[in-house]
Image: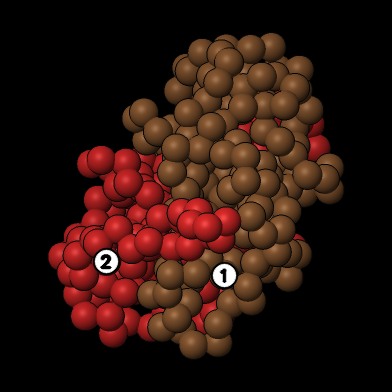
Chain colours: A red, B brown
Amino acid sequence: MPDRFPAPPSDKTLLEAGGTLTPRFDANGLVTAVVTDAGDGTVLMVAHMNAEALALTLKTGIAHFWSRSRASLWKKGETSGNVQQVVEMRADCDQDAIWLSVKVAGDGATCHTGRRSCFYRIVEITDGEAGLRDDGSAVLTNASAPHAHG
Amino acid sequence: MPDRFPAPPSDKTLLEAGGTLTPRFDANGLVTAVVTDAGDGTVLMVAHMNAEALALTLKTGIAHFWSRSRASLWKKGETSGNVQQVVEMRADCDQDAIWLSVKVAGDGATCHTGRRSCFYRIVEITDGEAGLRDDGSAVLTNASAPHAHG
């Protein structure tokens, strides 16, 4: 398994229809990663991957990311035990985003707040203002882990 | 409906548990937006929103983004007719990502290649190399629209 990936082709057709993973890392060396639950499709989190995180994810089958706030490689769930086993990985058309469909180990919490998903608040318009309403999802673990993907 | 949003609070508890939408736009003024199909949860695309796109989405109920490649506001589906009607919008814990659950109008294609989802290729390991396998999803429209979200 490569630690590096081939450079994206300048040919758009190759990029979008080719059979080679050539991630288009941004100026910071990152692609966006969306993580959903393989069981019901719930969006669990959005994070980022550098080449090393992507390579480790492919090599191990366990999701790794790059923590922008900590500026370090981040094996999701390493502390909590709630690691993410990758069931399927997909790349988008222009290869600057990755979709991971995962099975979460441990108590199933993905969010550092202890909830299953980071998306526990619904945006609602009230009196012309955009508010957030907690969806009431359970806190599965103590919110003790540092926030890594900010 | 505001065209601007309140600045994110320095208090992490307010940011993560509060009832106010205070998006944490990045250095380029963008948040990440994940779009899923309200019917079956398929991830359709990943794009970005600036404050104007987010405000317009809230105001109209139709998804708007910021096209980084075109450097312009982007009403998704304006040309093709495949606009995205927002069924639910959520913000993540630290408010730098938005999840839109949508119903796609027209022929249902979201990807500029004419496919329903931009994530039409599965990452697979063959002989130690990371390849992409097309999932065979149908091309619903001619791939004529310019690619806007690169």
Marks 1/2 same chain: no
Q: Identify the chain of the residue marked 1, using the numbered disc in the image.
A: B
How far apart are labels 1 and 2 at the CA level?
20 Å
Q: Residues within 10 Å of mark 1 (few under 14, many from 20)?
A: many
Residue type at the position of mark 1: Thr
Residue A119 falls left or right of residue A40: right
Q: Quadrant of residue B70?
A: top right
The relative height of residue A113 versus residue A38 in the rendered view (above or below) is below
The answer to whether one can see residue A54 in this image is: no
Residue B76, x across and y down, in percent: 67, 33
- Percent position of residue A117, x then y: 32, 59
Residue B85: give x, y in percent of width and height: 53, 32
Farthest residue in the front direction?
A127
The residue indicated by pointer 2 is: A115
Q: Residue furthest right?
A: B71
| Residue A137 vertical position relative to residue B112 in the rendered view, above or below | below
The residue where tag 1 is placed is B22
- Which quadrant of the structure image shows residue A29? bottom right
